[in-house]
Image: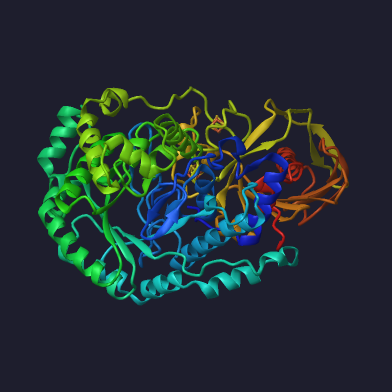
Amino acid sequence: MAELLGVGLTNHLDSILAEFKAKQSIYGYPKRKMYLGFPGLDLGIDFHGRRAETPLGPASGPHTQMVQNIVLSFLGGGRIMELKTVQTLDQLEIPRPCIDIRNIGYNVEWSQEMRLEDSFKEYVTAWVLLKLLEELEVLGIPKGSPFYDTVFDVSVGYDLQGIRSQAMQDWLRDFKNAGNALAGLLDELPARFDHLKQADIPANISDSITLSTFHGCPANEIEAIVEHLITEHGFNVIVKMNPTILGYDFVDQTLHRDLGYSNIVLDRDAFEHDMQFSEGVSMMQRLKDLAEKHGVNVGAKFTNTLVVKNNQAVFTDEVMYLSGTPLHVLSMNAMHRFRLAMGEHFHVSFSAGITKHNFVDAVLCNMRPVSTCTDLLKEGGYTRLFDYLKRLQKEMTDAGCSTVKELILSESGKASIAAGGVANANRIVPALLADPRYHYESNKKEPPKIASELELFDCITCNKCLPVCPNAANFSIHTGTVEIETSDYRFTGQDFQAVPGPDFVLAKQDQIANLADFCNECGDCDTYCPELGGPFVEKPRFFFSEESYRQFDQYDGFCFLTKYEMRGRIAGGEYSLRCNAGSEEYCWSSEKVEFKLDPAGRLLSGRTLNGLAAGSLIQMHPFHIMRILFDGVRNNPDDYPAVLLHRENL
Ligand code: SF4
Ligand code: SF4
């Protein structure tokens, strides 16, 4: 199984600058869907004393574990980034696939899949990169504008012992004061970015934590973790609540009878073992007092995913975790009930089944941030964030409000934002059950499939697999159509004789490929691909380095050694292809031969390697595959995959 491997700051910067200049897109995200601010409107909110330009962000999960995820979220208008949960057990084997968003949403993935130090590097790099985009005014917004106000919220898990471990203590301290790491990253920038080395980048990346605990974690352990994070580290802390806090009977009634999801099998034990509502309220009241003494805030996030029995054929685990539309109804109820118990000033954040249809209502309930995950795994991916903000823009404009606060007050008729949030929730939450949007009948459809198996090249080229990937791991290469009558070559003992080979045909102008080091085989692109087999399985896989190409040698794949030389493994055979700059002559070698060829695969000269027996046939299909991919990447040098694959340091 491939592992996630990030690339460095310079590589990201180079790829962003090249692609945006040439194509007005970044990691394939088009400018027309980028949030560039709405004139006359201030969407900003306060989050534990830091301003965020919008109340929106990606939830801790698949959209916040790598640098490009965070940049893509920023482009869509996300400004509170709930980083993927870090924990001491950082070498987990997550089963694959781990995400099933055919309709409502299930997963079996949880914490960051990268090592602690690698996660640290990804998050710090993303922080620096966002600041450099501001410094360079890449999007055309002047440096210093509140448009750039972005908050990073750390997520940690999962038990007291792990969070008190030395590794986690160091991680948290370093993240709160990342001066050395920032200086190291800036120092590594090459001379062409010398002007960025003095950029003023705050070293305190984050002072808030969202705590995620295991199902069944006792309330006293959760409380002890929060105490530790406040007293030892001085963080503001938000506790992620489980939807089980609503109790079995309420969830059973809501999911099964009111909304009609008779296919969801609840895990009754989880309701008994998880923290109970009254325990949660008294715990948060004590923690509120403690936080006040230490000059920080506490709050609660609604909610974690809901553990249910696995009755589907996608995952192998006994349980899976429900997200999406039905969870929205449960989590809104949990939030409202909990906040009524705690008082209107109690801080709540929210993530459960947020879409463009309910985002504004969630904002009206004064939840900060309103974050999203399942919806971003559907067609369009991160661009959906922008649609949420367009809805907010429309509501604010229609209501004649220029700030989010004004909107909350105007919709509630209250004098304070805290009272307004509760009043709006009084209206919005009870109405959810009657909204057909949340019922099973509106959420049972699966993405369409056609009876066609994916192959290495050519497909219906719908491009759905590109934006649904949270890591921007799938990409499209423009190759143009190809039709070549090929020759294979038989070794006579002295020279090579051409014999007719199979035609090499590409019917489509563009081909899909995959960046293996960005792909964790989550399976989401397979769900949305109309053809069968999974793009990440069947399409050409590119590794960023020869090292990872060699490490994952169970896969066919490719890697560039330089811009002019590529390695390839095809059906287990090892090949190399190179070409001098500006030349139309290719040097292709296998374990047996080294050939000089023209682009159509006509032999110009050849020699044997390793004692090729007379009569042996050299099949040239691997050459044609490699030549197409090699030229496809080289001829589109401003596309982010080309910049990353042709990295400077190679
Ligand atoms: S390419 Fe597909 S399987 Fe790989 S990370 Fe992206 S969506 Fe998941
Ligand atoms: S691989 Fe599948 S999803 Fe991707 S473009 Fe081809 S048919 Fe569409």
At 67% across and 27% down in the image, what residue appears? 508
- Is 450 on the left or on the right of 646, as rendered? left
Q: Is residue 372 visible?
A: no
Q: Nearer the viewer, residue 172 or 568?
A: 172
- Is 119 on the left or on the right of 15, as rendered? left
**Please, which residue is most extreme toward the front here?**
415
Q: Nearer the viewer, residue 22 or 512?
A: 22
- Is 242 on the left or on the right of 57, as rendered? left
Q: Nearer the viewer, residue 182 or 623?
A: 182
Residue 489, position as x, y percentages in the image: 80, 39
Residue 514, position as x, y percentages in the image: 58, 44
For the image shown, how many numbered marks are present on the structure?
A: 0
Q: Is residue 462 above or below residue 65?
A: above
Q: Is residue 2 visible?
A: yes
At 15% across and 28% down in the image, what residue appears? 257
At 67% across and 32% down in the image, what residue appears? 510
Residue 21, position as x, y percentages in the image: 71, 45
Ligand 2 is in which quadrant of the figure?
Answer: top right
Asked where in the image residue 332 lies, by quadrant, the reply is top left
Q: Quadrant of the C terminus?
A: bottom right
Residue 455, position as x, y percentages in the image: 58, 33
